[in-house]
Amino acid sequence: MNITSTEIASQPDIWRQSLAMLDRARELLARPGERVLVIGCGTSAFIAQSVALLREQAGLGETDAHYASEPHPWRSYDTVIGITRSGTTTEVIEALGTLPAGVRRIVVTATEDSPAGRLADDVLLLGFADERSVVQTRFPTTFLFLARAAFGEDVSTLPDLAETALATPGPRPPERFDHVVYLGRGWTYGLAQEAALKIRESAQAWAESYPLLDYRHGPLAVAHRGSLVWLLGAHDDDLVRDIAATGATAISRVATDPLVELVLAQRLAVETAVARGLDPDRPRHLTRSIVLT
């Protein structure tokens, strides 16, 4: 078995382990009334979008998410949370380094004593969720699982649900498929973007992601018999019928929680890579961390 598959399968146990940090996560992530910005690059940017929406929906305060690589005009945030598995992502480090005095800096990372961590006022260290693989799987899902718990959700059943889902066959793509689309709504749109990234990274395949109801506004035109369209954590009967009319395969409601669906999407990406004769542990042109000079 490849390393990535092993790390995907480890997620239920890693999620359970993370609950030992719940008090620390509440202290850092769930202070009521704070205006918060969450930043990251790649996978971390997509998880930032989901975390920001979940935090605001929990009534904890205005929360935004931005790509660390796309600086925005400064707004009066109380706290900025930077997500970087390695703690060495150049754009996250630069963004944290330019914050005005008085803004609390929190870094979520898997690496102790990292450059990003040294810029932070507080660090949420998830070293037990780190990965050997280049492609991120359990680090981002563990942070999102822990954040949901910190925001007041009951996530106690999710590890068991993930174990059950991983023990059963997942959604199957149509024969000779060459195109995967993930659709999400609300906080699951970040998951949809992450799922599509897994296909691109691991399998070098054509993958897209869109907000659920925006899919009709143009992207539906390229759906065909080789397309798999996965409504991740969302459902719409009318849209499923519209997708089916193109000849594409539409799937939804494959798990009882969107985070568990993301785990299944990770598995599909690895299976697709292996079917294409690729090594999912060593995606071309990618490294564990992007460090710019």
Image: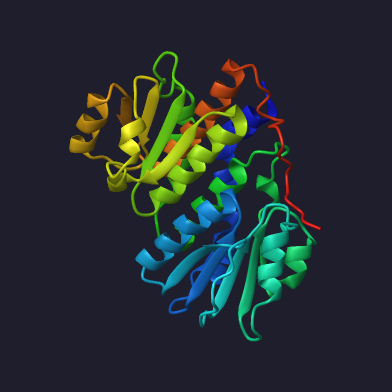
Q: Is residue 290 left or right of residue 189?
A: right
Residue under the image location 50 percent in, 27 percent down:
268
Q: Residue at x 66, y 56 (%)?
A: 84
Residue 1 found in image quarter: top right
Quarter of the image where the C terminus is located: bottom right
Instruction: Looking at the picture, tell me which residue is in the foreground, 227 or 21.
Output: 227
Residue at left offset 41%, top offset 35%: 181
Q: Please name the residue shown 57% across and 16% down the image.
A: 275
Q: How is the image coloured?
A: rainbow
Q: Position of residue 104 (x, y in %)?
A: 62, 78
Residue 48, can we see it? yes
Residue 254 visible in the snapshot: no
* Rendered position, 160 above or below 177: below
Residue closest to the eye, 65 or 177: 177
Q: Residue furthest bottom?
A: 102
Give how far across and how far down residue 216 sits, in percent.
27, 41
Residue lying farthest to the top in this orientation: 175
The furthest residue to the left: 238
Q: Position of residue 75 (x, y in %)?
A: 51, 80
From the viewer's perspective, tell me whether residue 244 is left or right of residue 227: left
Spot occupied by residue 76 in the image (x, y as percentages of width and height): 51, 83
Would residue 30 be found to the left or right of residue 222 on screen?
right
Q: Is residue 243 above or below residue 137?
A: above
Above or below, 218 against 150 in this view is above
